[in-house]
């Protein structure tokens, strides 16, 4: 029988950092505008300074411009059984700088083994993590 261990912290602890960068998993980004939540899958890259980079467009980007408070959830499973999960709450900043955005696209595309020019229309968003919770099983 496995035992679940849950931890809530103000910054991202080393174990959660390791989990976030351990494999190229899909994250789910939660935004909210006019008391209506919106959750959508995104690729991400965790930086060592309690910051997450995503590149996005459309409804997610519009929501972030209106309300920068976001949540990001990442989970790893084996055959339908959860191995671990990390949830981050933070404040997003839209970066309207093409050089910084191009660098983030490159880093994220490398992580997910995507074509170098993939998602060229997307805009960089940096999420400053305010709190993190993680659970391993």
Image (tube, rainbow, N blue to C red):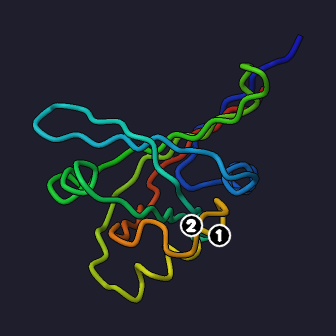
Q: Is residue 61 left or right of residue 48?
A: left
Specify whether 33 is left or right of 121: left
Where disc 1 sits, the SS reads: helix
Q: Specify whether 105 is left or right of 16.
A: left
Q: Which residue shows up at 25% across the image and 32% down it? A: 37
Q: Percent position (x, y) of residue 80?
A: 72, 19
Quarter placement of the N terminus? top right
Percent x, y for residue 111? Answer: 66, 64
Q: Nearer the viewer, residue 45 or 6?
A: 45
- The residue pinned by badge 2 equals 108
Element type where label 2 sits in the image:
helix
Point out the residue furthest to the right here.
Answer: 1
Q: Residue 110 carries which label?
A: 1
Which residue is drawn at the image coordinates 64% and 59% (left, top)? 112
Task: Work out whether 62 lies above or below 27.
Answer: below
**Percent of width and height locating residue 133:** 57, 39
The dot on residue 69 is: none
**Residue at x 28% of width, y 36% of height:** 38
State which quarter of the image contains the C terminus.
top right
Q: Nearer the viewer, residue 100 or 32?
A: 100
Q: Where is residue 126 in the image (x, y as percent from the top left)?
A: 40, 67
Which is more toward the observer, 130 or 83? 83
Point 50% across, 62% down: residue: 52
**Quarter where residue 71 is shown:** top left
Contact flag, marks 2 and 1 (Cβ < 8 Å): yes
Residue, far left: 34
Q: Picture quarter containing residue 77?
A: top right
Spatial distance from mark 2 to mark 1, Cα to Cα?
5 Å
In the rendered view, tell whether residue 124 sits above or below residue 37: below
């Amino acid at each position: 029988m496995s035992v679940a261990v849950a931890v809530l912290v103000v910054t991202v602890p080393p174990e959660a950092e390791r989990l976030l960068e351990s494999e190229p998993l899909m994250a789910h980004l939660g935004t909210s505008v006019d008391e209506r939540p919106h959750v959508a899958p995104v690729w991400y890259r965790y930086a060592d300074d309690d910051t997450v980079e995503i590149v996005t467009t459309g409804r997610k980007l519009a929501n972030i411009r209106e309300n920068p408070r976001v949540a990001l959830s990442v989970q790893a499973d084996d055959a339908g059984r959860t191995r671990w999960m990390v949830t981050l709450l933070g404040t997003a900043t839209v970066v309207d700088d093409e050089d910084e955005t191009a660098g983030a696209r490159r880093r994220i595309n490398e992580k997910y083994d995507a074509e170098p020019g993939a998602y060229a229309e997307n805009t960089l968003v940096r999420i400053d993590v305010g709190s993190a919770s993680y659970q391993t099983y």
